Image (cartoon, rainbow, N blue to C red):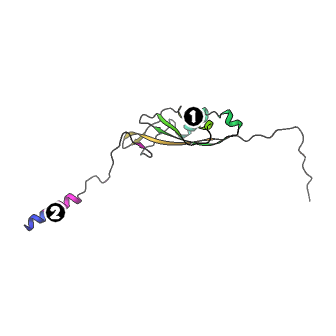
Amino acid sequence: MKYTILIFIVIASRLSFGQSTDSTFHPPVVEDKVFQVVEQMPEFPGGETAMMRFIQSRLVYPDSAREYNIQGRVVLGFIIEQDGTVTDVSVKRSVNYLLDNEAVRVVKQFPKFKPGRQQGKDVKVAFVLPIMFKLAPAEPAKDNKPIKRPPPQY
């Protein structure tokens, strides 16, 4: 009887506290899940500088916004799908609807990204992108009169 109880305790403890040979735990990748951070983040073709050049070359400052001196940072959110396409473009932080619409228009023109990867599989990744709208300072009107300076004081 003692041996039966001892064997039972040994077997139960082995089952309860046994460890697998793989010491790392990898949760299964869910296909429809949108990740915030992945092992390999999505990449714009040509890198981040190419993305900035793409935005600069296609961004058109709206005339009405320029006229009323509207400027600021529009923050957009979008999803990069498993095939690299950009979907679900939305404004996370608005400045003015004119600037918001222009930023969304440009991001919707993005080419396919190199998709994000998690555990060797292409996955959906949420992306946040700030786009800055800033007007150059206006130059003062030039007149041909010489500048009068006060005499120096000693």
Q: Are marks 2 and 1 in contact (CB under 8 Å)?
A: no
Relative to 121, say whether 1 is above or below: below
The amino acid type, in three-letter code, at marker 1 is: Phe
Task: Rate crowding at label 2 as few (under 14), some (14 to 19) or many (20 or more) other CA atoms within 10 Å.
Answer: few
Observer able to see residue 53: no
Write the residue at 9% across / 68% down.
2
Q: Nearer the viewer, mark 2 or mark 1?
A: 2
> Which quadrant of the figure has residue 3?
bottom left
Q: Secondary structure at mark 1?
A: helix
Q: Secondary structure at mark 2?
A: helix
The amino acid type, in three-letter code, at marker 2 is: Val
Which residue corresponds to mark 2? Answer: 10
Write the residue at 19% across / 59% down.
14
Residue 120, position in %: x, y? Answer: 36, 41
Q: Is residue 71 left or right of residue 23?
A: right
Q: Mark 2 or mark 1, which has the lower sequence index?
A: 2
Which residue corresponds to mark 1? Answer: 54
